[in-house]
Image (cartoon, rainbow, N blue to C red):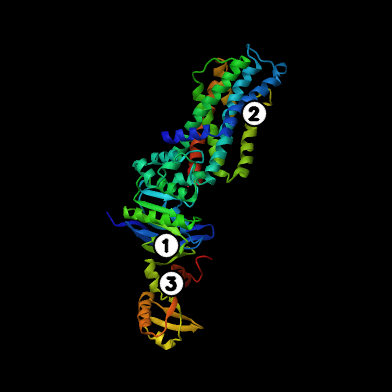
Amino acid sequence: MSNTIISVQNLKKSYGKKIAVDGISFSVAKGEIFGLLGPNGAGKTTTLEILEGLKNPDDGKIQILGREAIGVVLQSGGFFPDLNLRELLQLFSSFYHKSAPLARLIERFDLGSILYHKFSHLSGGQRQRFVLATALVHQPELLILDEPTLGLDPGVRQKFWETILSLQEDGLTILLTTHYMEEAEILCDRVAIIDQGRISAIERPVKLINSLGIVSRIKFMSSKLINLAELEELPGILAARRDRYTYDLETETPEISLRELLAWEKRFSGKIFNLQVRQATLDDVFLKLTGHSLRE
Amino acid sequence: MKTLILSFLKIFFRNPRTIFFVIFLPAGIFLTAVLLDLEGVIRFTGGFSYKDFLQSGIIALALMQTGIYTVAYTLIDYRRTRILKRLAVTPLSAGRLLAAQIISRFLIACLQVSALLILGKVFFGTTVKGLLYLPIFIFLGSTIFLDFGFLIASVARDYEEAAPYTALIGLPLIILGDVFFPIKNLPPGLVTIADFLPLKPLASTIRHFLLGGRSPDLARDILVLLVWFVVLTLVSQYIFAKKVYK
């Protein structure tokens, strides 16, 4: 049994003249959380729909598990409005040969109190839990999620991330799309930066941020004037600036520079305060790779 | 598939609007048409009345309406709310999905026909003789018109587009359907067309069995129904699977 769950090579798909996916390649290893990060219209959903067997590619090679082994979470909707959650869970598990004990799913996703509710009456968090439960009724090996936290409030999103990470601990392989860089940074073992149907980089989020030489900033205020040259001599500091009482340091290695700065402060006769570190994020990476921000 | 069929039945019985359209509307049309009392205009021979004629016609019409209208709109809704997409990512095939629709709708159609027969027998004293073969033709008729519904739902993107299609198919069928009045006095060309559209053969066959075996065209009518059944079922399943179930 190979360690690769998904393998995509030179995948292409157009709608008329519009090219949605323009020759992308990636692979997802067993047990990994892999993210496709990109803005709306980048080709993420089309890629997922091809992998789910909903669309045929124009070109390219795909290797993926069969439907019995894949659980899918769509971007929205997908449930009969006149059935309650219990009936929907039973219905979805009837489509598969293998099925998870519903009682366990209900407990794990805390659906006990809303089992007789209709999907349309659920809150955002309840919906998310239910949608995950229906995607897992057949104990799949691979879970595919399309923009799973779109429009959810931060608390719910946080909870959802915890759930996804716990599913990974159980051995599930997860492929998701997102245009929230924070989500990609927290969840994904590896991220593919996708824009206009092309992948420009595939890496661990931290590595992406570090490898592109994007600087982080350390800002602080000081009770006494500091000689900028003295700051620039600290290891890892690329440049130092001062604006009235605020100092602004650029660094590629914020962890090292911060430690050095604090060590230096002990020798310093004044005091520094209001210390802030702004780390480079995937958004900076995206901007650097594609020339525009994720939010555009 | 049993769970899916049961789910469709639950969905049907939880929706008061579809119950109205499937059970009460045909009953209402039946009542209204009886009140028209065409007996004075058209003579019915052999001891049968206009009500007898009408009963079979209304049954065929009701099967048509359920198929073409309600199912087309239901499926368009399922597509719009991404239910079809969610089902398509499971191992459930388009064929099994439609088969479950056909079976659940057949059960509903049996209920619908029973309601109309009881109404006719109890209130208007209509003739209700051979019921033995009736379910077969309820199944054929119901499925043929469901197939039309599947086709409309595969071609139309929304309600606005579906409405003219349903009218386009429904109207000529009703006019030439032998439903409200016998069409044998229409120009021969029209009668021939009617013979090969699905509604008239269905009405005639149902009439034949309910009134106790009097149709000389029975074999042809059954053949026409079987051809529609086979061709439409294959074509609609194929197009639905290709165009919509994804």
The answer to whether residue B163 is above or below residue B122 is below
Which mark is nearer the camera, 3 or 2?
A: 3
Quadrant of the drawing holding the N terminus of chain A: bottom left
Q: Distance between the residues labelled 3 and 2?
A: 74 Å
Give the letter of the chain under mark 3.
Answer: A
Q: Residue B176 carries which label?
A: 2
Q: Nearer the viewer, residue B128 or A116?
A: A116
Residue appearing at x 53%, y 39% in the figure: B150
Q: Would residue A97 appear left or right of B9 to someone viewing this image?
A: left
Q: Which of A213 and B193 is in front in this view?
A: A213
Residue appearing at x 69%, y 15% in the figure: B43
Q: Which amino acid does label 2 sit on?
A: Leu
Q: What element carries label 1?
A: helix
Q: Residue A184 carries which label?
A: 1
Q: Which of A51 and B183 is in front in this view?
A: A51
Q: Would residue B101 appear left or right of B152 to someone viewing this image?
A: left
Q: What element carries label 2?
A: loop
| Disc on the earlier residue, 1 or 3 | 1
Residue A148 position, x and y percent, is 45, 54
Which mark is nearer the camera, 1 or 2?
A: 1
Can I make out residue B71 in this image? yes
Q: Within 10 Å of the Cα at label 2, are there few (<14), some (14-19), or many (20+) other Cα atoms?
A: many
Q: Within 10 Å of the Cα at label 3, are there few (<14), some (14-19), or many (20+) other Cα atoms?
A: some
The answer to whether residue A35 is above or below residue B96 is below
Residue B45 position, x and y percent, is 65, 13
Residue appearing at x 55%, y 24% in the figure: B113
Quadrant of the drawing holding the C terminus of chain A: bottom right
Q: Which residue is the site of mark 3? A: A280
Residue A220 position, x and y percent, is 45, 78
Q: What element carries label 3?
A: loop
Q: Within 10 Å of the Cα at label 1, are there few (<14), some (14-19), or many (20+) other Cα atoms?
A: many
Q: Which amino acid does label 1 sit on?
A: Ala
